[in-house]
Image: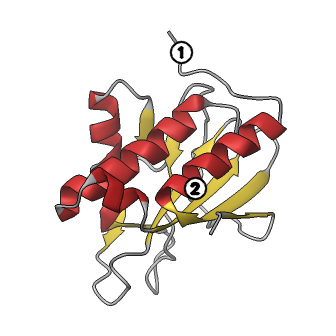
């Protein structure tokens, strides 16, 4: 099985993108609709600590929405092995994007008590909003396949980016 890449069929929820996008930053965006009567899109509980973990590893990863306005959704009824991650960045050609997805897979393994190899073979859906072009991507497959698909997308755009120095 290879990861499935879909362009343009997914769109970020209203209010989920940051007001200002820094070129070297990857933003975790909410992927769940607001509760009835609210305008605030929600994050899944699975990403609650990802920016903190990423920053401790030296990666410029932040939540897209300001502190104090975030809402989280614990999804007990959803298949626990299908995890999803919503991201936004200025350009797909950023190695921080791939680093963030790889870190999410590692975080997933640690939080569930799995080996890294097990987590990289489980289903993962990553949605990416490229803010400089307005293009949106959805990549779905096994974790390792999603990472390879992101690399292929970057190469196809003449990217490859850099993580900085």
Residue furthest to the left in view is: 113
Asked whether 157 or 77 is in front, the reply is: 157
Toward which corner of the image does residue 145 lie, by quadrant? bottom right
Q: Quadrant of the N terminus?
A: bottom right
Instruction: Specify whether 4 is left or right of 73.
Output: right
Q: Is residue 86 above or below residue 74?
A: above
Asked whether 50 or 68 is in front, the reply is: 50
Residue at 21% x, 53% y: name it. 110
Q: Is residue 109 visible?
A: yes
Residue 148 position in % (x across, y down)? 61, 47
> Please, what secondary structure does the residue beneath circle 1 have?
loop
Residue 129 position in % (x across, y down)? 67, 52
Residue at 32% x, 63% y: name it. 46
- Residue wearing tag 2: 146
Residue at 34% x, 54% y: name it. 117
Q: Is residue 25 above or below residue 142?
A: above
Residue furthest to the bottom in view is: 77
User: Total of numbered circles in the picture?
Assistant: 2
């Amino acid at each position: 099985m290879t990861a499935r890449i879909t362009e343009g069929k997914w769109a970020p929820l209203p209010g989920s993108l940051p007001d200002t996008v820094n070129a070297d930053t990857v933003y975790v965006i909410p992927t769940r609709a607001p509760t009835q009567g609210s305008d605030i899109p929600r994050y899944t509980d699975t990403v609650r600590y990802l920016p903190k973990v990423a920053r401790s590893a030296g990666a410029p990863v932040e939540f897209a929405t300001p502190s104090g306005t975030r809402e989280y959704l614990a999804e007990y009824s959803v298949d626990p092995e299908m995890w999803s991650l919503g991201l936004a960045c200025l350009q797909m050609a950023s190695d921080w994007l791939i680093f963030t997805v790889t870190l999410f897979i590692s975080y997933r393994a640690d939080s569930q008590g799995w080996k890294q190899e097990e987590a990289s073979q489980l289903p993962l859906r990553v949605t990416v909003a490229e803010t400089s072009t307005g293009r949106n991507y959805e990549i779905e497959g096994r974790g390792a396949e999603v990472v390879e698909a992101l690399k292929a997308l970057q190469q196809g755009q003449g990217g490859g980016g850099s993580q900085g120095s």
